[in-house]
Amino acid sequence: MNSSQSTLLLIVLAASLGALAFAVWLARWVLGRDRGTREMQVISNAIQQGAEAFLARQYKTITALALVVAVLIWVGYSQFRQTTTGDPVGDPGLLALYVTGSFLLGALSSGIAGFMGMWISIRANIRTAAAATTSLNAALQAALRGGAVSGFFTVALSLLGVAGLFAVLQAFQPADLTADEWARRIPFLIVGYGFGASFVALFAQLGGGIYTKAADVGADLVGKVEAGIPEDDPRNPAVIADLVGDNVGDCAGRGADLFESTAAENIGAMILGVLLYPYFGIGGILFPLVIGAFGLLASIVGVVVVRTREDADPMAALNRGFYVVSALVALALYVTTRWLLNPANAPDAWWHYFICGLIGLATAFAFLLITQYYTEYRYRPVLGIAEASQTGPATNIIAGLAVGMESTVLPVITISIAIIASYMLGQSSGLVNEAGEPVGGLFGTAVATTGMLGTAGYILAMDVFGPITDNAGGVVEMSGQSDRVRATTDRLDAVGNTTKALTKGYAIGSAALAAFLLFSAYLDEVRNYTGTELTVNLAKPHVFVAGLLGAMLVFWFTSLAMTAVRKAAQSVITEVRRQFREKPGIMQGTDQPDYARCVDIVTIGALRAMVLPGLLVVASPIVVGLVFKQFGIGAEAVAGFLMIATITGIITAVFLNNGGGAWDNAKKYIETGAYGGKRSDAHKAAVVGDTVGDPFKDTAGPSLHVLIKLLATITLVLAPMFI
Amino acid sequence: MNSSQSTLLLIVLAASLGALAFAVWLARWVLGRDRGTREMQVISNAIQQGAEAFLARQYKTITALALVVAVLIWVGYSQFRQTTTGDPVGDPGLLALYVTGSFLLGALSSGIAGFMGMWISIRANIRTAAAATTSLNAALQAALRGGAVSGFFTVALSLLGVAGLFAVLQAFQPADLTADEWARRIPFLIVGYGFGASFVALFAQLGGGIYTKAADVGADLVGKVEAGIPEDDPRNPAVIADLVGDNVGDCAGRGADLFESTAAENIGAMILGVLLYPYFGIGGILFPLVIGAFGLLASIVGVVVVRTREDADPMAALNRGFYVVSALVALALYVTTRWLLNPANAPDAWWHYFICGLIGLATAFAFLLITQYYTEYRYRPVLGIAEASQTGPATNIIAGLAVGMESTVLPVITISIAIIASYMLGQSSGLVNEAGEPVGGLFGTAVATTGMLGTAGYILAMDVFGPITDNAGGVVEMSGQSDRVRATTDRLDAVGNTTKALTKGYAIGSAALAAFLLFSAYLDEVRNYTGTELTVNLAKPHVFVAGLLGAMLVFWFTSLAMTAVRKAAQSVITEVRRQFREKPGIMQGTDQPDYARCVDIVTIGALRAMVLPGLLVVASPIVVGLVFKQFGIGAEAVAGFLMIATITGIITAVFLNNGGGAWDNAKKYIETGAYGGKRSDAHKAAVVGDTVGDPFKDTAGPSLHVLIKLLATITLVLAPMFI
């Protein structure tokens, strides 16, 4: 290990450990808050039990699946592959060990990140509820810091995993390689880490997403629509399951999602950094980790500075925090590009890449603005859906679908500009190969992605803030607090809905940008193994067909996810109807509903339903790769499959997320009194749209984020099998 | 002109003219049927007036747009293009003239085909209604033969246009070329014909589709849902507009659609035939036209043999006709491949291509079966939607969306197998170039497409059968006929709904197969102009971004089409409410509703709404081509844009068509008495799904078929601009 390398790794490891320590401090701070009244605790305990029981069972299933996949990877690498001269290590058994080991470590870390998100949020919810009895600021801080525990833990763990693996593998440097030569091979050995993380994330997001929306839809249809009782009413037997869902879906799911985003992006960017080793040395390979480390520190500052006056809009306080983080990340980009991406023979390179990083930050901003425009009722799209609700549910649905589809336009244009601009900045950075051709283009897109993900810690804190405030509202409602307290949690809940929508926009934007980076890493990896450049020629029938299959996978997966929600919701409805029928006392408030049974039913339904779509995603690229390998075109067909699945996935996810968000807020807008307000026909129509939007925005949409990255990481890991 | 060429052209021209003559005979036969009672005639006349008024205004708009485009093509070709040595004619002015002229001719022919479809169907509807008073067989024959007039006219005109242009251009053979050399260039000169046809088809299908569903949705929401009167009730002021819609949407629209399918496919296949000139001579270039000619004759036989017993299922009779046509087309493929695709140095070629043709026929069958499975209530998907309707409209919608998405899986697999199998059969046909590489693969996919489209005439007859029977039912209902007559038209109407759904499956299947052929023609054309092979490398950022934009276009267009329907329907609702309010006598039957005003409002709304999405589709590939040309990657970026738009378009169209069809039949299933039958809550929920499905299956879905082919033909025509 040379000194520059050790310095950089030290920075990354120190920052990650520091952030973890800070997360622990924050967690202790949150746990030290008041736990409220006994009534609150009863409810909170029920949520806690349900969430923990679900996660325990979910993790059991995922562990079994992950072990099977690990064995398959190991067998595939060690037994069935022809070794090539391009292999990063010559011994196939050793190569299999590295890839499989990093897969398992990635899976484990992703699981821990998801668990932590859920662990803190089921504890922060009651403290937020209790804090709401004293002040808005106290509640805001409790919820945001609860979210920050999850955010910092997740991002720090991701950095720690990649940097730690890197550091550990250095110790195994083969005798015939120099330290630097070995360092250039390590990224190819740890690609399994990203796959492991995505693998767990997919099931976590999918299972959690099905759980949360099955409970939500079921509780709403049978409670609000049939029995005519309000949301979060304690008489509804499915209400605890609904509150559990927020934790296991939004917290655990999104935690695992962003964990693997950063892990996969870092590894992908490192692989592209290897290509530029002649110019940047190890600094180029470790650059994404260093930016990640600085971004984490910036996020800490952001969370600490957030505070609000009692009469102010809490969203403004959260936005201020985000501006602070973005400014600090920009500063970090400036310093780091000057330091690490500044070779003597290309004096303009650093500022080209600095601008690439700023493009990434700007892309994040643009996605937040576009998401706001399409999902808030201050703007035309949501108002149009509300207006269409006057002529009934059918026009509400048509309008919502149209808004969702239209909302793909600006994000696609944004991503297009970001990719092309950062690529061209990279190309013109002055880095040229021996033949005089520019070679820095793809690294430009990698730097843009790095810049965009620099704020991930803070974004994730804002995201987990959502379910915490949502739960706090439920606890307050069910424990019968005063109207003043409810008003406080309602305000925070509204902000939480906004942050949840925004972070989904951020997540898909960064996934889209990262996707291009991950393809490039795939192509790079194939070149490393085969020694020849891979083109992905859509004009070949086999590649075109593979692309067609990729696009179809996205639709199929979405269909399965939505059907899973519908069926699990159906079983909730059947159960609640049974309880109402058999215990008429529930509706009079004289008899206690059986919450646990509903929790149980959703748990079983969600876990059963997540397996098929999950395995479909994992198996598809493998089947495509192995089948088309028979036609002598495996690696290229898989690339076509991956790219078109990604394109379709990005667009479908944006459609689902924004469509769902828009329906939700169209209903909220009518509830403010428009078109007859609550209980009007327009409101009834809007409730239909909102219900349809639930699996859109909280099950299928977010699962597609993970799907995109899982396809990319699985192909990265299995590329050597398809060649 | 050498003798083989003139023989082949003669066959094609004779068959087309024969089919036209037969269509005229059929039309006279239909017009000779009884025109029913005076009450029937009043209604039929009102429909006729509305349809003609719409088409007149629509064609005015389309003519203006087409002239603008013609000028742009002419200016672009003659003024702004750099001529290359690969140009099919040296003089840019002459080249511009050929391309522009064939564009205008294609547009004109497509317009005539659409007009004829509408013209006969508004005359056949009343004769079918009158025939229903005597027997089922008489009504079936009147409707099918009415449909056949449109079907034969359309397909014959398409063949006549392409073959006629070919024959005419031969007269302009330049002095420095032999007849055969010149014949090999002609396909590149008449690419404009396909573009002209698609251009008109897009607006015809889009405008007609918006019209028909705006009237339908508007009439249903305000009539069935608000006023509680049955469908086709004469008290509903929008009822005539609804009946007009069937003619202008389904007849005129689908006629133009299949016209341009056959035209574009023929030209594309001819371009691929040019490549194989060394092996097949002119026979390979004219092969698709010859198969088209035989297919037309086969379709005539099919229509003539259809007859039904009074107690039999009319669908069985239609199916028998289809089997006859398919068997005859298979025979024609056998004869023609042996004759034209049988070079001495590749003795196995003919039967390889014969099997390719059979694959095309089998693909048509597979699409019909898959469409049946997903849209008929004998099978699981529709039954699932009906079951989900019990818990309200939200679960009905979720179930329908999921079914639509799932229904993309089998069609994609079918198309994938068809493309790869026919490609590989072509590759192994024994045709090799000087370097010994196989070159017959792409022509294999062309032959498969030709085989699939061989039955187009009969399919189109079955398709137009749908709106004729639908209208006949409306005429019978509104003129107050006996229950027995209604029962007869109801049976035919049910069959018509099935044939409409099936032909949509056929149309998208053939579009998917043709799409691959049209890309290949595009790549071939670019090679002809530039002299170098074009690869479409998705790994390049610009190509990837172009693909992203292509997928986005499909979503954007769908959004605009659905919004157009919603807004136009909204204006119908407003108008009908006004009439009910101002003339209370309408509901008592003492006052006459103002049908014409509703017709007028939908006409204006639909025409205004079709322009923006239509121009978006035309402008997008041009903008992409010209912008990316600045980065030096115009032709390749356009290819990426085209291919991914096509993939997304195929899948989205299948989703929309089948989803809409499934919702429709889930409602019909409940109306048979399931889950409480008519007026139950489940039925109300199913009506919501059916209404959402209307713009899916009759506006956005079919318009996407045309969009796919328009993108392909526009890029074919403008390829020389992007190089």
Image (tube, coloured by chain):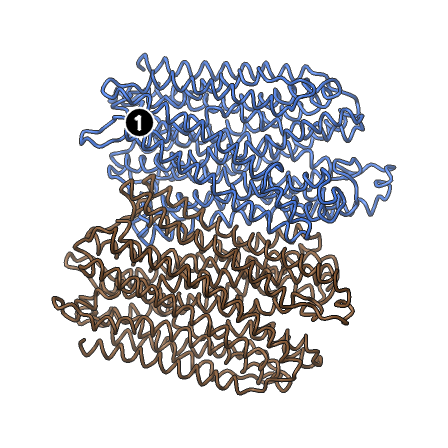
Chain colours: A brown, B blue
**x, y percent for residue B687:** 69, 45
Q: Which residue is found at the position 48% from the left and 22% from the top?
A: B326
The image shows residue B607 at horizontal and vertical percentages of: 60, 41
Chain letter behind tag 1 = B
Q: Count the marks: how many?
A: 1
Q: Which of B134 and B83 lies nearest the eye of the viewer?
A: B134
Label 1 neighbour load within 10 Å: few <14, some 14-19, many 20+: many
Question: Label 1: which residue?
Answer: B274
Give the left or right position of residue B298, taking residue A525 as reference: right
Q: Quadrant of residue B377?
A: top right
Q: Nearer the viewer, residue B19 or A113?
A: A113
Amino acid under label 1? Val
Height in image: B492 above or below B304? Answer: below
Q: Quadrant of the N terminus of chain B?
A: top left
**Residue B213: quarter of image:** top right
Which residue is most to the left? Answer: A176
Residue B623 coordinates in the image, percent (x, y):
41, 48
Quadrant containing the C terminus of chain B in the rendered view: top left
Left or right placement of residue B429 versus residue B412 in this view: left
Q: Is residue A420 visible?
A: no
Of residues B7 and A6, the one drawn nearer to the viewer in this rendering: A6
Q: Is residue A465 above or below residue B705?
A: below
Instruction: Choose between B303 and B714: the one closer to the eye.
Output: B303
Image location of residue B455, percent across then percent down: 49, 24
Asked whether the viewer can see residue B598, the reply is yes
Task: Judge from the rendering whether residue B703 lies leftward or rightward of residue A270; answer left or right.
Answer: right
**Considering the numbered disc 1 on the image, is that residue within a helix, a strand or a loop?**
helix
Q: Say left or right for B135 vs A297.
A: right
